[in-house]
Amino acid sequence: MSILEIKNLRKEFENAVPLKNVSFTVEKGDVISLIGPSGTGKSTLIRCINRLETPTSGEILIDGVNICASDTDLSALRRKVGMVFQSFNLFGHMTILQNIVVPQIDLLGKSAEEAREEAFRQLRRVGLEGKAKNRPDELSGGQKQRAAIARALAMQPEIMLFDEPTSALDPTMVSEVKNVMRSLAGEGMTMLIVTHEMQLARDISSRILFLSDGEICEEGTPEQIFERPQKEQTRQFVMKVTSWQWNTKSDGTDFFGMMGSLEDFCRSRFMNRRLMNSCEIVLEELYTGCLKPCIDENDGMSVTFSLETIGDNESVTLTADYTSIDFDPFEREMDDVSKAIIKSKSHLLPADEKNRRKWEIII
Protein backbone atom coordinates (compact mmCIF):
# COMPACT_ATOMS: atom_id res chain seq x y z
CA MET A 1 0.00 0.00 0.00
CA SER A 2 1.25 3.48 -0.89
CA ILE A 3 2.20 5.75 2.00
CA LEU A 4 0.39 8.65 0.29
CA GLU A 5 -2.26 8.67 -2.42
CA ILE A 6 -3.86 11.74 -3.98
CA LYS A 7 -7.13 11.16 -5.87
CA ASN A 8 -8.79 13.80 -8.07
CA LEU A 9 -7.77 16.62 -5.76
CA ARG A 10 -9.39 20.00 -6.40
CA LYS A 11 -8.98 23.25 -4.49
CA GLU A 12 -11.05 26.36 -5.22
CA PHE A 13 -10.68 29.85 -3.79
CA GLU A 14 -13.10 32.69 -4.40
CA ASN A 15 -11.17 34.06 -7.38
CA ALA A 16 -8.93 31.17 -8.40
CA VAL A 17 -8.74 27.40 -8.83
CA PRO A 18 -5.09 26.51 -8.11
CA LEU A 19 -5.74 22.75 -8.20
CA LYS A 20 -8.15 21.30 -10.77
CA ASN A 21 -7.67 17.53 -10.89
CA VAL A 22 -4.49 16.15 -9.33
CA SER A 23 -3.81 12.45 -8.78
CA PHE A 24 -0.59 10.61 -7.91
CA THR A 25 0.86 8.14 -5.41
CA VAL A 26 3.93 8.20 -3.20
CA GLU A 27 5.75 5.10 -2.00
CA LYS A 28 7.84 4.93 1.16
CA GLY A 29 11.31 6.38 0.47
CA ASP A 30 10.21 8.36 -2.61
CA VAL A 31 11.66 11.84 -3.09
CA ILE A 32 9.27 13.78 -5.31
CA SER A 33 9.95 17.30 -6.53
CA LEU A 34 7.06 19.49 -7.64
CA ILE A 35 8.22 21.93 -10.31
CA GLY A 36 6.54 24.34 -12.68
CA PRO A 37 5.83 28.03 -13.24
CA SER A 38 4.79 30.19 -10.32
CA GLY A 39 1.08 30.13 -9.52
CA THR A 40 0.43 26.58 -10.74
CA GLY A 41 -0.73 25.15 -7.40
CA LYS A 42 2.46 23.53 -6.09
CA SER A 43 2.41 25.12 -2.63
CA THR A 44 -1.36 24.75 -2.38
CA LEU A 45 -0.96 21.04 -3.05
CA ILE A 46 1.39 20.35 -0.15
CA ARG A 47 -0.63 22.65 2.14
CA CYS A 48 -3.63 20.44 1.38
CA ILE A 49 -1.59 17.34 2.26
CA ASN A 50 -0.86 18.87 5.68
CA ARG A 51 -4.46 20.19 5.89
CA LEU A 52 -3.29 23.78 6.21
CA GLU A 53 -5.75 24.14 3.33
CA THR A 54 -8.97 22.15 3.09
CA PRO A 55 -9.48 20.56 -0.35
CA THR A 56 -12.69 21.40 -2.18
CA SER A 57 -13.05 17.83 -3.39
CA GLY A 58 -11.05 14.66 -3.89
CA GLU A 59 -9.19 12.42 -1.48
CA ILE A 60 -5.82 12.40 0.27
CA LEU A 61 -4.97 9.02 1.79
CA ILE A 62 -2.09 8.60 4.23
CA ASP A 63 -1.50 4.96 5.16
CA GLY A 64 -4.92 4.28 3.63
CA VAL A 65 -6.79 6.82 5.80
CA ASN A 66 -8.61 9.66 4.05
CA ILE A 67 -7.47 12.81 5.84
CA CYS A 68 -10.07 14.92 4.03
CA ALA A 69 -12.81 13.38 6.16
CA SER A 70 -14.57 15.75 8.55
CA ASP A 71 -13.50 13.74 11.61
CA THR A 72 -9.76 13.85 10.76
CA ASP A 73 -7.54 14.18 13.84
CA LEU A 74 -5.29 16.99 12.61
CA SER A 75 -2.86 16.61 15.53
CA ALA A 76 -2.36 12.94 14.67
CA LEU A 77 -1.94 13.86 10.99
CA ARG A 78 0.76 16.41 11.73
CA ARG A 79 2.68 13.86 13.75
CA LYS A 80 2.96 11.83 10.55
CA VAL A 81 3.61 14.73 8.16
CA GLY A 82 6.42 17.21 8.86
CA MET A 83 6.40 20.61 7.18
CA VAL A 84 9.28 22.97 6.39
CA PHE A 85 8.27 26.46 5.25
CA GLN A 86 10.22 28.95 3.16
CA SER A 87 9.95 31.53 5.98
CA PHE A 88 11.19 29.13 8.72
CA ASN A 89 8.24 29.75 11.13
CA LEU A 90 10.43 29.54 14.23
CA PHE A 91 9.23 31.13 17.47
CA GLY A 92 11.40 34.19 18.01
CA HIS A 93 10.93 34.34 21.79
CA MET A 94 12.28 30.78 22.23
CA THR A 95 15.76 29.36 21.89
CA ILE A 96 16.41 26.90 19.05
CA LEU A 97 16.35 24.07 21.59
CA GLN A 98 12.97 25.19 22.96
CA ASN A 99 11.60 25.46 19.38
CA ILE A 100 12.34 21.75 18.96
CA VAL A 101 11.48 20.54 22.48
CA VAL A 102 8.08 22.19 23.03
CA PRO A 103 6.23 20.59 20.05
CA GLN A 104 7.40 17.14 21.17
CA ILE A 105 6.02 17.69 24.66
CA ASP A 106 2.74 19.24 23.48
CA LEU A 107 1.97 16.93 20.55
CA LEU A 108 3.81 13.69 21.33
CA GLY A 109 3.46 13.73 25.11
CA LYS A 110 7.19 13.23 25.65
CA SER A 111 8.91 14.09 28.90
CA ALA A 112 11.18 17.15 28.89
CA GLU A 113 14.24 14.92 29.14
CA GLU A 114 13.17 12.72 26.22
CA ALA A 115 12.38 15.78 24.12
CA ARG A 116 15.76 17.37 24.87
CA GLU A 117 17.61 14.18 23.91
CA GLU A 118 15.74 13.99 20.61
CA ALA A 119 16.27 17.71 19.95
CA PHE A 120 20.04 17.41 20.37
CA ARG A 121 20.06 14.30 18.17
CA GLN A 122 18.37 16.21 15.36
CA LEU A 123 20.52 19.32 15.86
CA ARG A 124 23.61 17.15 15.45
CA ARG A 125 22.03 15.68 12.33
CA VAL A 126 21.79 19.14 10.73
CA GLY A 127 25.08 20.46 12.15
CA LEU A 128 23.61 22.92 14.67
CA GLU A 129 24.30 21.36 18.06
CA GLY A 130 26.33 24.42 19.04
CA LYS A 131 23.38 26.77 18.36
CA ALA A 132 20.90 25.16 20.80
CA LYS A 133 20.92 28.13 23.20
CA ASN A 134 20.67 30.81 20.49
CA ARG A 135 17.45 32.50 19.48
CA PRO A 136 16.39 32.53 15.81
CA ASP A 137 17.40 36.15 15.24
CA GLU A 138 20.98 35.20 16.14
CA LEU A 139 21.20 32.69 13.28
CA SER A 140 21.78 33.11 9.56
CA GLY A 141 19.00 32.26 7.14
CA GLY A 142 20.56 28.91 6.31
CA GLN A 143 20.92 28.05 9.99
CA LYS A 144 17.30 29.00 10.65
CA GLN A 145 16.13 26.69 7.89
CA ARG A 146 18.27 23.84 9.18
CA ALA A 147 16.80 24.42 12.65
CA ALA A 148 13.30 24.27 11.13
CA ILE A 149 14.20 20.96 9.48
CA ALA A 150 15.49 19.63 12.82
CA ARG A 151 12.22 20.66 14.50
CA ALA A 152 10.17 18.78 11.90
CA LEU A 153 12.40 15.69 12.10
CA ALA A 154 12.13 15.57 15.89
CA MET A 155 8.42 14.72 15.49
CA GLN A 156 9.48 11.47 13.73
CA PRO A 157 7.29 12.06 10.65
CA GLU A 158 6.64 9.47 7.98
CA ILE A 159 6.61 12.15 5.27
CA MET A 160 8.46 15.48 5.03
CA LEU A 161 7.00 18.37 3.03
CA PHE A 162 9.24 21.24 1.88
CA ASP A 163 7.71 24.45 0.52
CA GLU A 164 10.44 26.35 -1.35
CA PRO A 165 12.97 25.72 1.46
CA THR A 166 15.75 27.76 -0.18
CA SER A 167 13.83 30.63 -1.79
CA ALA A 168 14.21 33.02 1.17
CA LEU A 169 17.95 32.44 1.48
CA ASP A 170 20.96 34.37 0.25
CA PRO A 171 22.70 32.39 -2.54
CA THR A 172 25.69 31.79 -0.26
CA MET A 173 23.44 29.98 2.26
CA VAL A 174 21.50 27.77 -0.13
CA SER A 175 24.08 24.99 -0.31
CA GLU A 176 23.98 24.21 3.43
CA VAL A 177 20.23 23.53 3.29
CA LYS A 178 20.59 21.53 0.07
CA ASN A 179 23.25 19.35 1.71
CA VAL A 180 20.92 18.50 4.61
CA MET A 181 18.14 17.57 2.17
CA ARG A 182 20.51 15.42 0.13
CA SER A 183 21.50 13.64 3.34
CA LEU A 184 17.85 12.99 4.23
CA ALA A 185 17.19 11.60 0.76
CA GLY A 186 20.18 9.28 1.16
CA GLU A 187 18.76 8.03 4.46
CA GLY A 188 15.46 7.04 2.80
CA MET A 189 13.21 9.82 4.09
CA THR A 190 9.98 10.17 2.11
CA MET A 191 9.87 13.77 0.85
CA LEU A 192 7.75 16.07 -1.31
CA ILE A 193 9.59 19.22 -2.32
CA VAL A 194 8.22 22.35 -3.96
CA THR A 195 11.25 23.97 -5.53
CA HIS A 196 12.60 26.23 -8.25
CA GLU A 197 16.07 24.78 -7.65
CA MET A 198 16.30 22.57 -10.71
CA GLN A 199 19.71 21.17 -9.77
CA LEU A 200 18.40 20.06 -6.37
CA ALA A 201 15.37 18.45 -8.03
CA ARG A 202 17.61 16.66 -10.49
CA ASP A 203 20.12 15.51 -7.87
CA ILE A 204 17.88 13.98 -5.21
CA SER A 205 14.48 13.18 -6.74
CA SER A 206 13.26 9.70 -7.55
CA ARG A 207 10.39 11.29 -9.46
CA ILE A 208 9.46 14.75 -10.67
CA LEU A 209 5.98 16.17 -11.20
CA PHE A 210 5.66 19.12 -13.56
CA LEU A 211 2.55 21.12 -12.66
CA SER A 212 0.90 23.58 -15.00
CA ASP A 213 -2.44 25.33 -14.71
CA GLY A 214 -3.49 23.33 -11.65
CA GLU A 215 -2.80 19.88 -13.11
CA ILE A 216 0.10 17.46 -13.50
CA CYS A 217 1.24 18.08 -17.04
CA GLU A 218 3.99 15.43 -16.98
CA GLU A 219 5.77 13.18 -14.50
CA GLY A 220 8.81 10.94 -14.67
CA THR A 221 12.34 10.37 -13.46
CA PRO A 222 14.76 13.32 -13.46
CA GLU A 223 16.35 11.93 -16.63
CA GLN A 224 12.99 11.72 -18.39
CA ILE A 225 11.84 15.19 -17.37
CA PHE A 226 15.12 17.07 -17.87
CA GLU A 227 16.55 15.18 -20.86
CA ARG A 228 13.56 13.67 -22.71
CA PRO A 229 10.40 15.62 -21.82
CA GLN A 230 7.39 14.46 -23.82
CA LYS A 231 5.21 17.55 -23.55
CA GLU A 232 6.14 20.79 -25.29
CA GLN A 233 5.12 22.77 -22.23
CA THR A 234 7.55 20.79 -20.08
CA ARG A 235 10.33 21.11 -22.63
CA GLN A 236 9.96 24.88 -22.81
CA PHE A 237 9.99 25.20 -19.03
CA VAL A 238 13.05 23.00 -18.54
CA MET A 239 15.13 24.32 -21.44
CA LYS A 240 14.21 27.97 -21.18
CA VAL A 241 17.37 30.10 -21.13
CA THR A 242 17.25 32.60 -18.30
CA SER A 243 20.00 35.15 -18.70
CA TRP A 244 22.04 35.89 -15.59
CA GLN A 245 22.75 39.57 -14.99
CA TRP A 246 24.64 41.65 -12.44
CA ASN A 247 25.25 45.41 -12.33
CA THR A 248 28.49 46.80 -10.89
CA LYS A 249 28.64 50.42 -9.70
CA SER A 250 31.26 52.82 -8.40
CA ASP A 251 29.38 53.24 -5.12
CA GLY A 252 29.93 49.63 -4.13
CA THR A 253 29.69 46.11 -5.61
CA ASP A 254 28.93 43.00 -3.56
CA PHE A 255 31.66 40.87 -5.13
CA PHE A 256 30.84 37.72 -3.14
CA GLY A 257 27.15 38.17 -3.85
CA MET A 258 27.93 38.48 -7.55
CA MET A 259 30.03 35.31 -7.60
CA GLY A 260 27.46 33.39 -5.55
CA SER A 261 24.68 34.48 -7.88
CA LEU A 262 26.71 33.36 -10.91
CA GLU A 263 27.35 29.93 -9.37
CA ASP A 264 23.65 29.51 -8.61
CA PHE A 265 22.74 30.33 -12.23
CA CYS A 266 25.33 27.91 -13.62
CA ARG A 267 24.00 25.11 -11.43
CA SER A 268 20.42 25.84 -12.46
CA ARG A 269 21.51 25.33 -16.08
CA PHE A 270 23.09 21.94 -15.24
CA MET A 271 26.42 23.30 -16.42
CA ASN A 272 29.34 20.90 -16.16
CA ARG A 273 32.00 21.64 -13.56
CA ARG A 274 34.70 22.59 -16.10
CA LEU A 275 32.56 25.21 -17.84
CA MET A 276 31.19 26.56 -14.55
CA ASN A 277 34.72 26.95 -13.16
CA SER A 278 35.78 28.76 -16.34
CA CYS A 279 32.84 31.19 -16.04
CA GLU A 280 33.71 31.96 -12.43
CA ILE A 281 37.43 32.42 -13.14
CA VAL A 282 36.90 34.68 -16.17
CA LEU A 283 34.36 36.88 -14.37
CA GLU A 284 36.57 37.20 -11.29
CA GLU A 285 39.68 38.12 -13.27
CA LEU A 286 37.78 40.44 -15.60
CA TYR A 287 36.29 42.30 -12.66
CA THR A 288 39.32 42.44 -10.35
CA GLY A 289 42.04 42.80 -12.99
CA CYS A 290 40.39 45.23 -15.40
CA LEU A 291 37.08 46.76 -14.40
CA LYS A 292 37.34 47.30 -10.65
CA PRO A 293 40.26 49.78 -10.92
CA CYS A 294 38.27 51.81 -13.46
CA ILE A 295 35.10 51.62 -11.36
CA ASP A 296 36.94 52.76 -8.24
CA GLU A 297 38.45 55.76 -10.07
CA ASN A 298 35.28 57.00 -11.79
CA ASP A 299 32.15 58.07 -9.95
CA GLY A 300 28.95 57.02 -11.64
CA MET A 301 30.56 54.29 -13.72
CA SER A 302 28.33 51.28 -14.25
CA VAL A 303 29.06 47.96 -15.97
CA THR A 304 26.43 45.28 -16.45
CA PHE A 305 27.53 41.66 -16.80
CA SER A 306 25.23 39.09 -18.36
CA LEU A 307 25.69 35.40 -19.11
CA GLU A 308 23.83 33.21 -21.58
CA THR A 309 24.37 29.63 -22.63
CA ILE A 310 25.04 28.68 -26.25
CA GLY A 311 23.53 25.47 -27.56
CA ASP A 312 23.34 22.58 -25.11
CA ASN A 313 25.77 24.17 -22.65
CA GLU A 314 28.56 23.76 -25.21
CA SER A 315 29.83 27.22 -24.31
CA VAL A 316 28.59 30.49 -22.84
CA THR A 317 28.74 34.15 -23.75
CA LEU A 318 29.70 36.60 -20.99
CA THR A 319 28.82 40.16 -21.98
CA ALA A 320 30.24 43.27 -20.33
CA ASP A 321 28.05 46.27 -21.20
CA TYR A 322 29.61 49.65 -20.33
CA THR A 323 27.42 51.90 -22.50
CA SER A 324 26.90 54.25 -19.53
CA ILE A 325 30.50 55.49 -19.56
CA ASP A 326 32.51 57.56 -22.06
CA PHE A 327 35.69 55.48 -22.36
CA ASP A 328 36.63 51.90 -23.05
CA PRO A 329 38.07 50.18 -19.94
CA PHE A 330 39.40 47.39 -22.17
CA GLU A 331 41.72 49.86 -23.90
CA ARG A 332 43.55 50.39 -20.61
CA GLU A 333 46.36 48.11 -19.58
CA MET A 334 44.93 45.04 -17.89
CA ASP A 335 46.76 43.22 -15.10
CA ASP A 336 49.12 40.76 -16.89
CA VAL A 337 48.14 37.79 -14.73
CA SER A 338 44.43 38.46 -15.22
CA LYS A 339 44.97 38.91 -18.96
CA ALA A 340 46.80 35.56 -19.23
CA ILE A 341 44.12 33.72 -17.24
CA ILE A 342 41.26 35.18 -19.28
CA LYS A 343 43.07 34.39 -22.54
CA SER A 344 43.58 30.77 -21.47
CA LYS A 345 39.88 30.32 -20.70
CA SER A 346 38.07 32.38 -23.32
CA HIS A 347 38.06 34.51 -26.44
CA LEU A 348 37.50 38.25 -26.00
CA LEU A 349 36.05 40.27 -28.87
CA PRO A 350 34.08 43.49 -29.32
CA ALA A 351 30.35 42.80 -29.68
CA ASP A 352 29.55 46.18 -31.15
CA GLU A 353 32.17 47.59 -33.54
CA LYS A 354 30.17 50.80 -34.01
CA ASN A 355 30.37 52.32 -30.59
CA ARG A 356 32.68 49.85 -28.82
CA ARG A 357 30.66 50.03 -25.64
CA LYS A 358 30.01 46.34 -25.22
CA TRP A 359 32.32 43.32 -25.17
CA GLU A 360 31.57 39.64 -25.47
CA ILE A 361 33.68 36.89 -23.99
CA ILE A 362 33.13 33.40 -25.41
CA ILE A 363 33.96 30.81 -22.77
Image: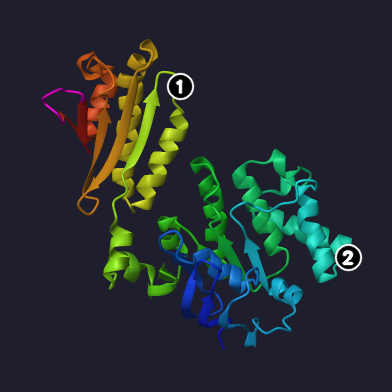
Q: Is residue 270 above or below residue 73?
A: above
Which three-letter amino acid code belongs to the residue tagged 2?
Answer: Ser
Picture coordinates of residue 13 (x, y %)?
A: 55, 69
Disc 1 crowd rating (10 Å Cα; few below 14, some 14-19, many 20+) is few
Residue that carries the numbered disc 1 in the rendered image: 252
The percent position of residue 54, horizontal first and vertical second, equals 63, 74
Residue 244 spot, x, y in % from top left: 34, 41
Position in image of residue 266 (x %, y %): 35, 46
The image quarter containing residue 230 is: bottom left
Q: Residue at x 23, y 35 (%)?
A: 345
In-image side of 81 versus 245 (left or right): right
Q: Secondary structure at mark 2?
A: loop
Q: Does 43 appear in magenta?
A: no
For residue 163, above or below residue 156: above
Q: What secondary structure is marked by label 1?
A: loop
In the picture, the quarter occupied by the C terminus is top left
Q: Residue at x 64, y 54 (%)?
A: 126
Who comes first in sequence, dot 1 or dot 2?
Answer: 2
Q: Which quadrant: the N terminus?
A: bottom right
Q: Is residue 186 visible?
A: no
